[in-house]
Image: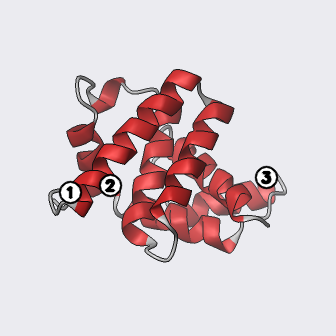
Amino acid sequence: MKRSEAREQAFTLIFERSFREEPIEEMIAQATEGRQIEVDEFARRLAALAFERLDAIDQVIQKYSIKWNINRLPKVTLAILRLAICEIDGMEDIPVSVTINEAVELAKKFASEDDASFINGLLGAYVHSKEQGEGEE
């Protein structure tokens, strides 16, 4: 499975978490058994890491979503941002530019062009701030 497909699986798990407070393994088991979906190992790791770091990730999103309260963001946009910030902070072997591009592509597929632009801007500001030593909480 390509990494972009695995990211899409992780996005789906993170999006579903917006509606259900279940452990990642339970959600994966339901996807595997109920929908006959084989969840990729990279998707598992990425979704599990996002769930583990959810509070810290949401703080980053709130900080960089100027004029937007995190609770007012569309759930799809929020899930994509959670995925991307988790990948930026937790998977240093993946180039940041790849992560941002993949997040924008997910937004184009599952959200809108406006959401894609918002995601690109927020992630760009976060990465720039991290590079300047300001992004760490």
Separation of residues labelled 2 and 3 (CA atoms): 38 Å
Residue 41 percent coordinates (x, y): 66, 73
Q: Residue at position x 54%, y 42% from top?
A: 15
Residue occupied by mark 3: 34
Task: Measure the C-alpha gap from mark 3 to mark 1.
Answer: 40 Å
Give the vertical position of 70 relative to 13 (above or below): above
Q: Nearer the viewer, residue 133 or 52?
A: 133
- The numbered mark, 2 or 3, whose residue comes first in the sequence reads 3
Q: Residues within 10 Å of mark 3 (few under 14, many from 20)?
A: few
Q: Is residue 56 left or right of residue 18?
A: left
Neighbours of disc 1 within 10 Å: few (<14), some (14-19), many (20+): some
Q: Which residue is mark 1?
A: 135
Q: Give the label on residue 30, or none.
A: none
Q: Quadrant of the C terminus?
A: bottom left
> First in sequence: mark 1 or mark 2?
2
The kind of residue on which mark 3 rests is Gly
Circles 2 and 3, Cβ within 8 Å, touching? The answer is: no
Between 9 and 101, the one nearer to me in the picture:
101
The answer to whether mark 1 and mark 2 are in CB contact below 8 A is: yes
Question: Between disc 3 and disc 1, whose residue precedes?
Answer: 3
- Would you identify the image quadrant in which residue 26 lies? bottom right
Which residue, given by chain and number where applicable, does mark 2 sit on? Answer: 127
Res 55 visible: no
- Disc 1 and disc 2: Cα gap in Å? 7 Å
Q: Secondary structure at mark 3?
A: helix
Task: Say what secondary structure mark 1 lies in.
Answer: loop
Q: Amino acid at mark 1?
A: Gly
Instruction: Name the residue rendered at 23%, 23% in the picture.
Output: 67
